[in-house]
Amino acid sequence: MLLTVSGPPGSGKSTAAPALADAFGLEHISGGDIFRELADERGYTPLEFNKLAEEDDQIDRDLDARLQEIAREREDVVLESRLAGWLAGDHADFRFWLDAPVSVRGARIADREGKDPEAAAEETAARESSEAKRYEEYYGIDIEDRSIYDLSMNTGRWDEDAMIALLVDAVEAYQADADEGKEPVELGVEF
């Protein structure tokens, strides 16, 4: 089974993806971890590396190619990144989009990284804008298009345990339908 978890920074991806992996005995692979490793290897902070990626499209393309290869060649994985759903395409069994208001996401990031919540929210909004432009330019992807996702959730409405329970329930319902022979609707997304 291949599950994807996508969403903007602070949306709950890094909480949900490992929990889903644990719940279903899958490996968790994070695009953010891969991006941070690449930044560290080259001596940049993630924010600096993100800015560099605005001018050097090979950074994004290398990361995305690696994630797309994982989606196509690996099984029993939860793939987590902002573009995971798009990169996996129809290889994914279930695609999640997680989101929350920028103030909620900024507070989560601030708590995690020891920053001021307002500053974290501003950085997050700037990062999202930068990434959205690149996704459109490189791949013609409108990151605001949620039509490819099986479930889109505002994670600001539930606590962590409730959010994870809802996601697990959705996958279990999907598996039950698959066990009954119901075919999922193919969305025809090619990347």
Image (tube, grey):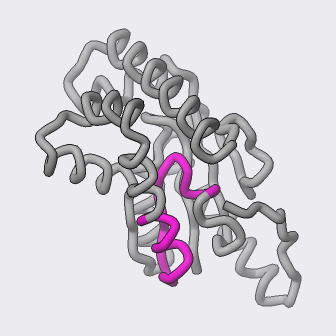
Taking the view exactly as shown, the residue that stands out farthest to the top is 118
Relative to the observer, which residue lies in front, 101 or 147? 147
Q: Quadrant of the N terminus?
A: bottom right
Q: Quadrant of the C terminus?
A: bottom right
Q: Residue at x 34, y 19 (%)?
A: 120
Q: Residue at x 56, y 77 (%)?
A: 72
Q: Residue at x 78, y 84 (%)?
A: 178
The magenta segment: 66-86
Q: Is residue 81 above or below residue 157?
A: below
Q: Is residue 154 above or below residue 38?
A: above
Whether residue 158 appears in this view of the structure is no
Relative horizontal placement of residue 145, taking residue 18 as reference (left or right): right
Place of residue 2 in the rendered image (x, y in percent of width and height, measured from the top left):
57, 74
Place of residue 33 in the rendered image (x, y in percent of width and height, measured from the top left):
30, 53
- Does the segment drawn in magenta span residue 9? no
Q: Is residue 50 above or below residue 73?
A: above
Q: Is residue 126 above or below residue 76?
A: above
Dividing the picture into quarters, in which one does residue 121 lie? top left
